[in-house]
Amino acid sequence: MRTGSTTHALRRPKMLMLALATVLASALAAVLISPASAAKDTPPNDAPAKAQLAAAPATFTHPGVLVSRPQLDFVKAKVAAGAQPWKSAYDQLLGSKYASLTRTAKPRAVVECGSYSNPNNGCTDEREDALAAYALSLAWYISGDSRYATKSIQIMDAWSAVIKDHTNRNAPLQTGWAGSSWPRAAEIVKHTYSSWPNSGRFGTMLRTVYLPEVINGSHSNGNWELSMMEAAIGISVFIEDRASYDKAVTKFRGRVPAYIYLTTDGSLPKAAPGSGLDTRDEIVRYWQGQTTFMNGLSQETCRDLTHTGYGLSAISHFAETTRIQGQDLYPEIADRLRHALGLHAKYQLGEPVPANLCNGSLKDKLGPVTEVGFNALNTRMGIGMTNTQRLTEQQRPAGSNNLFVGFETLTHASNPN
């Protein structure tokens, strides 16, 4: 026994030295083989930091899609006090078709949407039912009247019992629009109302019918992929799917710089990862033929302001949801978003369009889409935005675009939470 013990004692130092040598050799090999390993200590814009930024929260915040409980409580108190602009915005909500207690849902198994909703087989019905479910959930929380929650549940249950698919050319966009509104409503109702027996079935609908259609994005005009990512992040929060949350964040972080130009990008706008746009001609064509690039220009500015507004709205909505979830993306996109809102607001307010911007002519209007981004950048971050503020205040109370935007003066005007 003593001999054996002595032998083991003699072996231990040798074994320890061998183990230490192995560890040191492995570490040295790793450094020699992988120079990129040195990037772990580089500034915040490196790949490891980006990976960390894309991580879903360990615990999801509910309600947490576009609006949070503190935001809702702020609004509820303002409405109760009769304060403006929240009281007039709330009256607008209650007077709209979306908050009607007599609304009857119109679900169908297959929603078929062609280009510009032609054909329109359930497209308008689905979008507006989703907006109604959201409007009713807001009315429930602010008023405390359970009839609104019950009606919202009826609409969501009607669709979750029936829908199976979206088809035709606009299927991805349609799914993105409706899929952006549904989880907003579902979050409020599930997490603030006493009972929703079919909430699990609704979650299954979002997971199986909506998420697969939007999560991989689209290389069409940027407002498509941005709306699809808005739907993806909202659904991910509701069903607590961390993998899809991370995937949506990654796509968002690649798409925003490819949708809003800054002069620091260089002589040409960035291309979205995987887009295949790698020549000047291809990028100019994708940017509607525009060859002069300025701070805040959108990939769709020269198409029209309405589609641009869709993209800017989806960007704001996405960032708002991730902020609620403890992952504030606004600092990363703030410069692009403030320039984009300001540039388009300036010309919508009537400033002459220069000849080098879309041949001196812009079409249409942004729509009721500025409240969320303006509140985030101006109210919470303290960024001055004169033109955006003028346009936002002119449009109050902001109603709905009847697609995926609704009642954002009520939810986000001067909301510090």
Image (cartoon, grey):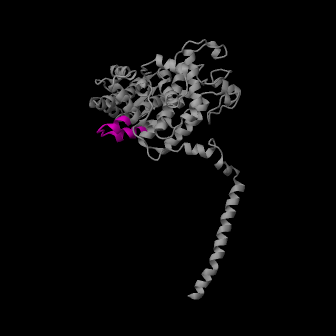
**Magenta-highlighted stretch: main secondary structure?**
helix
Res. 148 in view: yes
Picture coordinates of residue 2, whole percent (x, y): 57, 88
Picture coordinates of residue 256, whole percent (x, y): 58, 32
State the quadrant of the C terminus.
Answer: top left
The residue closer to the viewer here, 192 or 222, is 192
Residue 124, quarter of the rendered image: top left
The reply, left or right, for residue 363 in relation to residue 152 is right
State the quadrant of the N terminus.
Answer: bottom right
Tell which residue pokes out farthest to the right in this image. Answer: 32
The residue closer to the viewer here, 118 or 9, is 9
Q: How many marks?
A: 0
Against 20, is 35 above or below? above
- Tell whether position 286 is magenta: no
Q: Kindly identify the residue that appears in the image at 51 percent across and 34 percent down.
A: 319
The residue closer to the viewer here, 302 or 135, is 135
- Tell whether position 192 is magenta: yes
Res. 107 in view: no
Residue 143, quarter of the rendered image: top left
Q: Kindly identify the residue that appears in the image at 59 percent across and 13 percent down.
A: 351
Against 3, is 334 above or below? above
Picture coordinates of residue 16, whole percent (x, y): 64, 72
Picture coordinates of residue 395, whole percent (x, y): 46, 17
The reply, left or right, for residue 327 in relation to residue 292 is left
Q: Which residues are magenta?
A: 187-206
The residue closer to the viewer here, 370 or 384, is 384
Q: Kindly identify the residue that appears in the image at 68 percent across and 57 percent down.
A: 30
